[in-house]
Amino acid sequence: MPPPFQRLLDDLGATVLRFLAASVGPVDADDCFQETVIAALRTYPRLSHSENLRGWLLTIAHRKALDHHRARGRRAVPVAEPDAGHADPEPPRDDGLWTAVEDLPPKQRGAVLLRFVGDMSHREIAAALGSSEEAARRALADGLAKLRKEWTPA
């Protein structure tokens, strides 16, 4: 029997929010977190086991992050430049590593984020991505290889 939903959120909410912040950025993380919680709350009463609630919740968050990235590609782009005095400042970013992670293909990006932000095992990553454990290992290895190639001095 799963624990009360509020206890699940108290225990795992910060982890899910960190994962989403790394996946979609700090500006959109709250919206994705809210969508994740609503989706989880809808299906929570039908759960038959509570063996891996962390993986289950991070899988939902991963799918909401993918939805966010897909939706971003369909949004309209403004034609005229906004007035510089009225533009919101861009949130501070690090040295570009997270941008490089965001530029990875979806499976590789998901594998890297689930491994290093979600601290998930290869088996949990495979379940979250809907693939085999070997495919999850390959996606993670390929993603890390691309990042190393960009971030390792020549």
Image (spheres, rainbow, N blue to C red):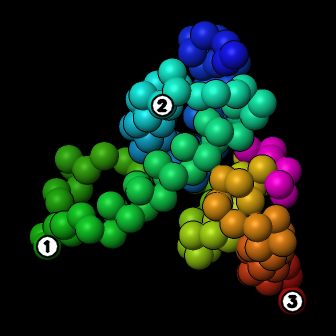
Q: For the residue marked with disc 2, what is the amino acid?
A: Thr
Q: Is residue 43 left or right of residue 144?
A: left
Q: Nearer the viewer, mark 1 or mark 2?
A: 2
- Name the mark on residue 43: 2
> Where in the figure is residue 96, as x and y percent of width and height?
63, 65
State the CA–CA distance, disc 2 to disc 3.
49 Å
Q: Residue reaching furthest bottom?
A: 154
Look at the numbered disc 3 and give the secondary structure of its residue.
Answer: loop
From this view, report whether residue 8 is shown above or below residue 122.
above
In front: label 2 or label 3: 2
Would you say 149 lies left or right of 39 here? right
Q: Callout 1: few (<14), some (14-19), or many (20+) C-alpha neighbours within 10 Å?
A: few
Q: Nearer the viewer, residue 91 or 72?
A: 72
**Residue 26: where, in percent of width, then height?**
50, 42
* Three-letter residue code for mark 3: Ala
Which one is earlier in the sequence, the residue at label 1 or at label 3?
1
Residues rendered magenta in the picture: 118-123
Q: Mark 3 — residue? A: 154
Residue 57 in sight in this render: yes
Is 40 included in the stretch rendered in magenta? no
Residue underneath mark 1: 79
SS at mark 1? loop
Q: Main secondary structure of the magenta part?
A: loop
If you read the primary sequence from the N terminus, does the residue marked by circle 2 or circle 3 appear first? 2
Residue beneath the point at 60% across and 19% down: 9
Q: Secondary structure at mark 2?
A: helix
Q: In percent of the image, x 60 and y 10: which residue is there?
A: 4
Looking at the image, residue 21 sits to the left or right of residue 75; the answer is right
Q: Nearer the viewer, residue 15 or 5?
A: 5
Q: Residue at (74%, 59%) from the top-left corner?
A: 126
Q: Hey, what amino acid is under mark 1?
A: Val
Q: Earlier in the sequence, mark 1 or mark 2?
A: 2
